[in-house]
Image (cartoon, grey):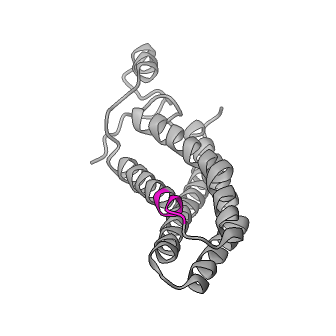
Amino acid sequence: MKHLKRPARRALLVLHVAVSVAWLGLSVGLLTLGITAWTTGDPSLTEASYRAMKVFADWLLAPVAVVTLVSGLVLSLGTPWGLARHRWVWIKFWITMATAAATVFALRPEIEHAAAAGVPDISLVAAPTVSTTAYLFMTAISILKPWGLTRRGRRLRSGASSPKAVDGRSVRRTA
């Protein structure tokens, strides 16, 4: 894939960060509602919490997960970072794939079931705890960019004919 031009790359980066933050916020909101439903002794509050979770799950979770995944994929393929050149990008991709699949195929049906039953369900505390942890981890590695190049990234870099980066731009280290 051709590298994105700067305005397109920046717009896509803003979109990706915004939907990623939205996904983290949704996860924290679901965690709060799940804890409320699990710890309250009031059946009407449990039911209300699960109905609120259902609204988030039905209208926001899947679109936000898909836009996060697609925007991250396009960014990785359209920039010098590449999808499989740096370990942190590769790990983020697979964690995003796993959490998006879990959101659509496991969490949403579980919320649907809990909203219908109105009975406290510990899995609706556990799942948002895991997803929130995953999103915070991905945020950290996006900032820190640890672990260096993958084997493919090292091969591409060593195969370059000049001391420039793989994309032909000058090598520039960031803090």
In the rendered view, does 93 fall on the left or right side of 69? left
Q: Which is nearer the eye, 85 or 106?
A: 106
Q: Main secondary structure of the magenta part?
A: helix
Could you tell me which residue is drawn at 47 percent across and 81 percent down?
Answer: 40
User: At which x and y percent is residue 70?
Assistant: 65, 47
In the rendered view, does 87 fall on the left or right side of 65? left
Could you tell me which residue is drawn at 42 percent across and 29 percent down?
Answer: 165
Could you tell me which residue is drawn at 63 percent across and 45 percent down?
Answer: 101
- Which residue, as the protein is rendered here, is positioned at the far left? 175
User: At which x and y percent is residue 96?
Assistant: 54, 45
Q: Which residues are magenta?
A: 121-126
Residue 93 appears in the rendering = yes
On screen, 28 above or below 167?
Answer: below
Q: Which is nearer the eye, 145 or 163?
A: 145
Residue 130 is drawn in which quadrant? bottom left
User: At which x and y percent is residue 24?
Assistant: 50, 63
The stretch drawn in magenta includes residue 40: no
User: At which x and y percent is residue 45?
Assistant: 57, 84
Q: Which is nearer the eye, 67 or 121?
A: 121
Q: From the image, which quarter does the N terminus lie in?
A: top right
Residue 4 is drawn in which quadrant? top right
Could you tell me which residue is drawn at 34 percent across and 39 percent down?
Answer: 172
